[in-house]
Amino acid sequence: MKLLPTKKSKQDEPEAEAAPKPSRGERLGRARELATHHGTESSIDVAGWVDSRTNATGIFTAMMSRHVPKGTNWFYTLGSATMFIFAMQAITGVFLSMYYTPSATQAYASITHMTNEVFMGEFVRGLHKWGASLMIILIFLHMARTFFFGAYKYPRELNWVIGVVLLILTTVMGLTGYLLPFDQRSFWATIVANNITASGPVVGPYLADFLRAGPDFSATTLSRFYALHMMVVPGLIGALIGAHLFLVVKLGTTAPPWIRAGRPKGARPVETVEAGLPGDDLAEVSVNGAGATAAATDGAEPTAEAPLEEAPADDAPADDSPADGAPADEATAEAAPEGGDADGEGADGEEVSS
Amino acid sequence: MLPARQYTCGRPISEAVSDPLNKNTSAGDEPRIKLPEAEPRGYFEGESMTRRKVFTVASQAIGGVAGAAVVLPVVGFALAPLFSRGQERWEAIGSTDDFNAETYRPVVFTEITGIGEAGKTTAYVRRGSAEHDEDPNEFIAISTRCAHLGCPVRFVQAAANFICPCHGGVYDFLGKRIGGPPVRPLDRFQTRERNGQVELGPRYSVTNQLKAVRVRDPGEFTGGIWEYLYPPRPSTFPPPK
């Protein structure tokens, strides 16, 4: 049924002499355009090649062009700010490790060397040092925003839990990083922190032994803290930030509490499902504001057939002959109810409307 | 548009969708047309598990074994220091004539090797005094590690007290707590006499009655039930008799 109009228009083609027949080159060009449009063939630049294989643009669009609720304000940037600081800490940390020696006898000397003698060393180390404090501050502000805006509630509880783990891991980063300069302050601060750990009953003494790599602060303690600070904890933080972001994109953000809940612009009407319907009346259940029966009685074909109808129409070069009489109208009448819903931007729809 | 039968208000779909073979059968009747019961998909006769399931379980088990073969040794590698005890170390700190029973003399010695200056610690050493029921031929070495959080304490001669600069812990002449937040007396070091020299050995902790126990970290109580709440660690040396 669907194929009929295009077949008819093909038959009509000889009659419409006025429309020049597209050359082979033109037809190939059109085919390639369509293939590109459908994603089966991308344009030949590198970005397009990669994009067609990774859907990078689609993922980027899904992440960045999300709907956000009314009232979204500057407080919603605190999470991104924290993530930026984490990235800064990762980058500066990797470069600091080029000059740092994780040895109890050489650590302090390597720190003073990189701070006082290496070009820009003081700046890079300063970024890392002050960034650590800033990250803790931003995390707590971000956490306060989430708490006071009620953004930890269903369905975002898991994201709150992940956030708490991230907070703990960040403080572990602070603890392990504080020792690395290995001056008097960092040494004694670590001693005290370890002893606080040890004062937890039952597991405390063993946990402190694990952190210190033995019953006392020793040469291995510094290496252990360095490994935790450089590899273990940042890896965990990175993975958990990924999960955190995934859930943010998946679940969306909440409106501030002072914004009244309402239907966002362009949203579908609320579903109404009445309870206790007899089995025979299923067709009358209102779905998305429209009677389910309406779809059946309109005479529209099931949507699953839409691509079948679209594909041959695209391939046929005669489809763009506007001089068609009744067959073209038929096509318009049938294409309109379907095309208007989802795939209105298709090339087919544009041509029919013209 | 979603198919209408998804909106069945909680009733199972099987109830809502009538059996097309037995349209005119009323509820409760034996269906007139019966199809042979379908075999579960993928099962052969007598099987309790599909091949797909077998391969799923087997491949995950093999993956788990391979993962464990890597992870378990690595975890053991990281936890090893909890269960290994280092070499007992003794260091001579001076002649026996250098110490008397009336007051302490500070000595600096290396408690942990391999970390340079950070491994050195200070102990206050004196000869045992009969006044405190101690053997005059023994030596008492008090650690400067505060029993609160490990800051270094100082012996104040005028008060004959050990005083911690961090949080105000105060200990008497014997190292017993008399003020501030510390939870037990100051730790001690084992002492012995070799060739006219006093030697300091491993650290040990004491209870409030000055009974020697295995060393505990600062902040951990000793004696009584606390011996179970802060269990002795296998990485520490046994206390002296």
Image: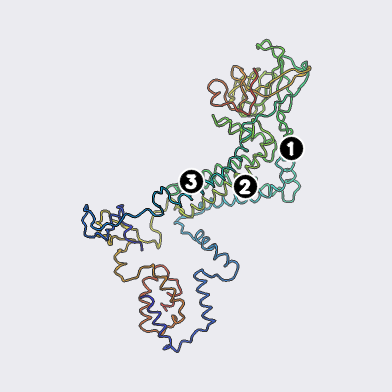
Specify the quadrant of the image occupied by residue B154. Answer: top right
Mark earlier in primary sequence (1, 3): 1
Q: Are marks 1 and 3 in contact (CB under 8 Å)?
A: no
Mark 2, chain letter? A
Query: What amino acid is found at the position of numbered circle 3 in the picture?
Result: Trp
Q: Answer left or right for A212 relative to A76.
A: right
Q: Toward the viewer: A252 or B177? A: A252
Q: Answer left or right for B111 relative to A274.
A: right
Q: Position of residue A85 (x, y in %)?
A: 60, 50
Query: What amino acid is found at the position of numbered circle 1 in the picture?
Result: Thr
Q: Are marks 2 and 1 on the same chain?
A: yes
Label for residue A105?
A: 1
A64 versus A314 height, above or below: above
Mark 1, chain letter? A
Q: Toward the viewer: B28 or A261? A: B28
Give the quadrant of the N terminus of chain B. Answer: bottom left
Binning the other alpha carbons within 10 Å of mark 3 as few (below 14), some (14 to 19) or many (20 upward) gives some
Specify the quadrant of the image occupied by residue B211. Answer: top right
Observer-side mark, 1 or 3, equals 1
Label for residue A160?
A: 3
Label for residue A136?
A: none
Question: How many tags in the picture?
Answer: 3
Binning the other alpha carbons within 10 Å of mark 1 as few (below 14), some (14 to 19) or many (20 upward) gives some
Q: Answer left or right for B75 relative to B20.
A: right
A10 versus B224 height, above or below: below
Give the residue number, with chain letter if any, for mark 2.
Answer: A131
Spatial separation of the CA atoms under disc 2 and disc 3: 23 Å
Mark earlier in primary sequence (2, 3): 2
Q: Residue at x 37, y 73 (%)?
A: A336
